[in-house]
Each structure stands twice: as C-alpha cells, then as structure tokens.
Image (cartoon, rainbow, N blue to C red):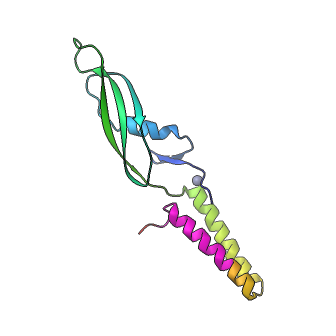
Amino acid sequence: MPSCGAILYRGRWVKDPRVIEKLILESIEYMGRVTNASIETLSLRHGLNTAVVKVRGSVHGLISDYDEEVNVRVRYSEELCPRCRDMINERERAVIQVRSAVPMNGLLKRLIIDVVRKETIKNERSGFFKD
Ligand SMILES: [Zn+2]
C-alpha cells in the first residue's frame, strides 16, 4: 500500500516535500550574515545521509560574501502517518471479517494468508514495524 507521502515536520504530518529542505536548513546554526543557503546534494536513504548545503554570506562586515559548504547529517526513516496506519488497520479488520464470515476452503485460506503476508512485508519495508 503506497503511503500518502506526508512528512513529520515539527510534530505535524505535512504533505509538502519542501519541508525536508526546511528541516535541513533550519538545523544549521548560522554565524554572521547569511544571504543565501541552498541544498547542493541530498539523497534520502533509510538511515544516515549527508546533505551538502551551500551557504553564502560573510562573518564580518568588511569581508565580502563568499560561499561555504556545510555537511549536514540527516537521519531518514519511513513510517506511516496515522491516517495511512488507520487505513491498513481497516483493511486488516476486513480480512479478518472475511475469514470469520465465509466457510473456508483451502484456496480461500491460502489467498487470505497471502494477502496478510504481503501487507506485512510491505509494512516492514516502510519501517512500520520496528524492533
Ligand atoms: Zn499517510
């Protein structure tokens, strides 16, 4: 089941991929005068990533602006937002209802078990189940 793509930003789930950039830029402690900050490279894989941020500005009024590259550590993990989680729970409830309502032959039994297993694998991939 594909997730809605919402991102947890300051305790709220936001459907805007730009918040990733905001989070990274807000994590930097700037000194002096900053005229521009932009993310040069970023790849999001499960676990630790490094984003390269180019900062333009100057630490002193007599020094003209220059660029500096900053490495920002980004810890990335995927989990389901409460709404997506509810949808999966609903589906699991539906599967369980089928199981109890219909007399099961072997084929149907296998079918249902297969569905549950596929959902479980997907959940594990998306980081829903954590150790
Ligand atoms: Zn969601």
Residue at 55% x, 69% y is 121
Residue 95 or residue 111, whichever sits in front: 111
Q: In the rendered view of the protein, which quadrant contains the C terminus?
A: bottom left
9 relative to 2 in the view: left or right: left
70 relative to 22 in the view: left or right: left
> At which x and y percent is residue 2?
62, 56
Above or below: residue 50 compared with residue 118: above
Q: In the rendered view of the protein, which quadrant contains the N terminus?
A: bottom right
Above or below: residue 48 compared with residue 116: above
Q: Which residues are magenta?
A: 112-129
Above or below: residue 105 compared with residue 30: below
> At which x and y percent is residue 38?
41, 29
Residue 128 part of the magenta-drawn span? yes
Residue 23 part of the magenta-drawn span? no
2 relative to 10 in the view: left or right: right
Q: Is residue 100 visible?
A: no
The quadrant holding residue 80 is bottom right
88 relative to 125 in the view: left or right: right
Residue 41 or residue 33, whichever sits in front: 41
> At which x and y percent is residue 110?
68, 82
Residue at 65% x, 79% y is 113
